[in-house]
Image: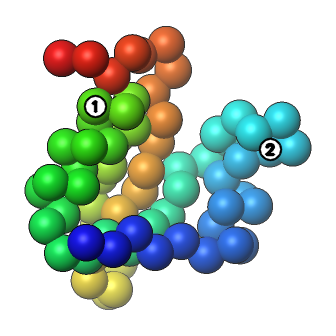
Amino acid sequence: NGIYLSRANLDVAFDDSGRQINPLTARLTGNVAGVMKVFNRCGWQAEPDSGISLPHQYSLIARQGVSGKD
């Protein structure tokens, strides 16, 4: 499994306090369904980017106030 992020995307997605202000663009490879399950348990939502020509491109959004427990 792989999770690929760029520094530029990290800078745009988070403010100086570490709060997410924009979706984080990431590339997920391998067992994507398994990685998405882990993200969900940790309070993150991963959605495939629509209209993007790059394969395996996702938007990651931290859910506020969610424990991540099912």
> Which residue appears at 80% of the width and 44% of the height?
15
Badge 1 amino acid: Arg
Question: As drawn, is 31 to the left or to the right of 54?
Answer: left
- Helix, strand or loop at label 1? It is helix
**Disc 1 versus disc 2: distance between alpha carbons?**
24 Å
Nearer mark to the viewer, of 1 and 2? 1
- The C terminus - image quarter: top left
> Which residue appears at 75% of the width and 61% of the height?
11
Numbered mark located on residue 41 in the image: 1
> Which residue appears at 69% of the width and 72% of the height?
7
Q: Residue 46: image x %, image y %?
A: 32, 49
Numbered mark located on residue 30 in the image: none
> Which residue appears at 49% of the width and 13% of the height?
65
Q: Is residue 23 visible?
A: yes
Badge 2 amino acid: Asp
Q: Is residue 51 visible?
A: no
Cβ–Cβ under 8 Å for marks 1 and 2: no
Count of numbered tags:
2
Which of the two residues, 50 or 14, is positioned nearer the viewer here? Answer: 14
Question: Where is 36 relative to 42, above or below?
Answer: below
- The N terminus - image quarter: bottom left
Q: Which residue is mark 2?
A: 15
Q: Residue furthest front?
A: 1
